[in-house]
Amino acid sequence: MMTGKECVSAVLSRRKADRVPLGFYLVDCDTIGSVIGRKTLVRDTIGQRLALAAGRRDEVVEAMKKDVVEFYRKIDCADLIVPKEGGLVAPKNYEPEKLRRIDDETYEDGHKRVWKISRLENAMLCVHDPTQRTEFKVEDFPMPTAVTPPDPSVFEVLDHIVAELGSDRYICSYNHITALSRPGGFETGLMLYALQPEVIHACNRQSVAYQNANDAHYVRPGTDGIFVEQDMAGNNGPFVSPDMFREMCQPYFKERIQRLKTFREHVLFHNCGMNIPLVDMFIEAGVTCYQSLQTTAGMEIGKLKRMFGDRLVFWGGMPVESLIAGTPEDVRCDVRTAMERGGPGGGFILGPSHSIAYGTKYDNFMAMLDEYTKLRDKWS
């Protein structure tokens, strides 16, 4: 039997594999806690932020290292891991963030931004930001002349995960890409595409130059591929027209992907929403694998394979909505459907349509793993 590393490498390289592999982009704290049998700080957005603000960096890091590795060893069947659960941690010499408690659910940071705790989403949401800008000019985005390397300790958890799990799992470096810049936030940024395209070009140029300069640090030793993400569409289609994307985003997107491929052969790309009008450009840029097949937005694996399956590997197929709101039998049915439509002919990795998101029912998660292991060898 192939190791997970061998199986995923074969699928990404269009070679024969002995099974359909399973991959996770990230897993949230409630599922990890249920599997390992204790509360965890991994992907606990609220708990982590408050702990770091209190100066408990080393406690957070040690918990993350221990709990992520234990989780993946216990479920055992994950072949492809993007260790975003480890993420980039605060450096050892970090200055704790100043958070002033307003009430049990509200905090103010040192920049006078107000953050509201959302227990339902396991998030701290910015509800007031006096630093947010609405006006920009080209001069606001100079090309970087020198880039300060990150402190190596920010990679402490990620490097530990690679050392512990990388011998037999395919593990990606988690890197950056910004090719559809939105300075000033979502609405302001998109307005700039129509009103000040020169600002968008300047912002994209700066972002790509900065990210390119950091690749030697962010592409970690021992990793097999590179994972990048940027959402470029909503449920009904791309945020900008395909023609606008080709003119104002594609040159920078392609430059970024081609740069990453000088470090690793395979680049895996996460992008939510209805992106079919842009997929040909993703392929043209050199993307190996597309992740986050948002079924509810029309990104159904059977259709995608018919349209692009000879040129692009797909990773997903299991609707996250079923994991959160469905029953175990709903989940099993969705796994069978995804495997039946994605498995034939190869070029497919099973996974959730986004992530194992906060609110996923434990029984549903275990049903997904069980149904997958029953079917994974069928299309070898």
Image: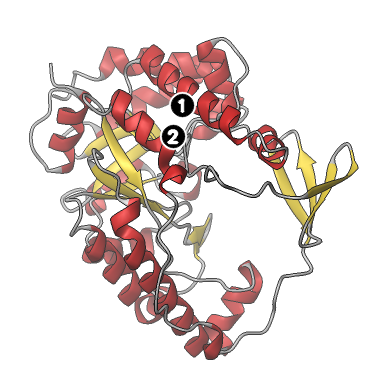
- First in sequence: mark 2 or mark 1? 1
Q: Nearer the viewer, residue 111 or 26?
A: 111
Q: Is residue 141 above or below residue 148?
A: below
Q: Is residue 358 above or below residue 177?
A: above
- Find numbered disc 2 in the image and state the secondary structure of the residue it sits on: helix
Q: How many marks?
A: 2
Kind of residue at badge 2? Val
* In the image: residue 344, left or right of residue 193: left
Q: Which residue is mark 2?
A: 157
Q: Residue at the far left: name it.
A: 15
Quadrant in which the N terminus is drawn = top left
Q: Identify the residue shown where x is 48% and y is 44%.
A: 88
Q: Which residue is mark 1?
A: 65
- Is residue 276 shown to the viewer in this render? yes
Q: Identify the residue shown where x is 55% and y is 33%.
A: 357
* In the image: residue 129, left or right of residue 258: right
Give the image quarter of residue 172: top left
